[in-house]
Image (tube, helix red, strand yellow):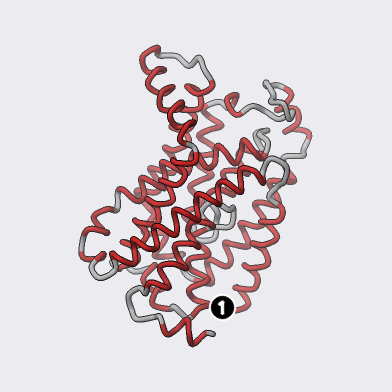
């Protein structure tokens, strides 16, 4: 089997690899298990060493490939949350006209803006540098274990008396958890800062932002919704800003693979967010934490 995987490794990217990596991106970008960590670890396990090397190169086909995957994933999120995005964008412009926040949609719009700023600034400045330094199999495995610990810790902290007291001091939803639109801008900024750590391969963007929401009294459903809404502009911007990579020489010879991989990523992302929004109505992060710990420890032993 390993020979079959290695046979596709040609120095660029095969269609088979594009499909696998596209599906992997679409699922793991939204599941709290780190898309970047998996995209580093699994190719190494499959013997796709040239893919791993391309991820840490200053100039490679993988940069162009990422553009397509990011844009496709963001578009899938926009389609799934299309009705809510219409209200959020409308609320944003309405609030600019009125110069005050009166509705939950208006407040949510500015919470998303506030939370996007930290990751946007740090991402622009350090995303590629951090990828070059840390997007390596062993480092990704270590951070995947750290991600599992963060998820477990988040589930423990949300049960503490301080969080219950925080919930009691705000309006609650029908489940008895704090309403999403009661977050203040400082709290949204803290969620955005937490998102910065997802620049390390192995730390999940959705996982760490969900934990940040949970410890501020949100339930799993609202924490996941805020995380997915917040991911949309960040992922889309990451793709759009790197369009020159796709249109330039890095995309030469792999644009067909990029298209196929992007379609797979978009479809996988849509069904992933559809599944997770239902999952988090009644379940928690613990299964994902156990998964990260198991896979991370296995990879550490394998690559050490």
Q: Is residue 227 above or below residue 239?
A: above
| Residue 188, position as x, y percentages in the image | 53, 33
Residue at image coords 58%, 57%: 33
Residue at image coords 49%, 57%: 200
Which is nearer the eye, 172 or 263? Answer: 263
Q: Residues within 10 Å of mark 1 (few under 14, many from 20)?
A: some
Q: Is residue 2 above or below residue 294?
A: below
Q: Is residue 149 above or below residue 168?
A: below
The quarter of the image holding the N terminus is bottom right
| Residue 238, position as x, y percentages in the image | 36, 49
The quadrant in which residue 169 appears is top right
Residue 216 left/right relative to 228? right
| Residue 74, position as x, y percentages in the image | 42, 46
Number of residue marks: 1
Residue at image coords 39%, 43%: 120
Which residue in the structure is indicated by mark 1? Answer: 303
Q: Is residue 27 above or below residue 169?
A: below
- Outermost top residue: 98
Which is nearer the eye, 17 or 248? Answer: 17
Q: Secondary structure at mark 1?
A: helix
The quarter of the image holding the C terminus is bottom right
- Outermost bottom residue: 3
| Residue 126, position as x, y percentages in the image | 38, 53
Residue 12 left/right relative to 87? left
Residue at image coords 71%, 30%: 177
């Amino acid at each position: 089997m390993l020979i079959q995987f290695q046979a596709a490794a040609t120095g660029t990217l095969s269609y088979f690899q594009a499909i696998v990596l596209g599906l992997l991106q679409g699922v793991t970008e939204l599941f709290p298990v780190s898309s970047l960590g998996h995209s580093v670890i699994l190719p190494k396990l499959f013997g796709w060493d040239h893919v791993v090397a391309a991820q840490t190169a200053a100039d490679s086909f993988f940069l162009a490939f990422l553009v397509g995957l990011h844009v496709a994933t963001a578009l899938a999120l926009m389609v799934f949350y299309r009705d809510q995005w219409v209200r959020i964008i409308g609320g944003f412009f309405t609030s600019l006209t009125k110069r005050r926040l009166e509705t939950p949609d208006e407040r949510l719009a500015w919470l998303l803006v506030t939370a996007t700023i930290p990751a946007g600034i740090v991402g622009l400045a350090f995303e590629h540098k951090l990828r070059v330094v840390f997007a390596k199999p062993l480092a990704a495995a270590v951070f995947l274990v750290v991600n599992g610990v963060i998820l477990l810790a988040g589930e423990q902290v949300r049960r503490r008396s301080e969080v219950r007291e925080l919930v009691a001091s705000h309006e609650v939803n029908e489940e008895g958890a704090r309403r999403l639109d009661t977050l203040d801008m400082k709290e949204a900024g803290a969620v955005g800062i937490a998102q910065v750590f997802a620049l390390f391969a192995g730390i999940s963007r959705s996982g760490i932002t969900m934990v940040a929401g949970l410890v501020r009294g949100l339930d799993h459903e609202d924490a996941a919704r805020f995380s997915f809404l917040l991911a949309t502009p960040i992922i889309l911007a990451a793709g759009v800003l790197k369009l020159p990579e796709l249109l330039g020489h890095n995309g030469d010879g792999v644009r067909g693979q990029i298209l196929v991989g992007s379609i797979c990523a978009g479809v996988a992302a849509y069904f992933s967010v559809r599944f997770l929004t239902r999952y988090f109505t009644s379940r928690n992060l613990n299964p994902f934490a156990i998964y990260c710990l198991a896979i991370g420890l296995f990879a550490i032993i394998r690559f050490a």
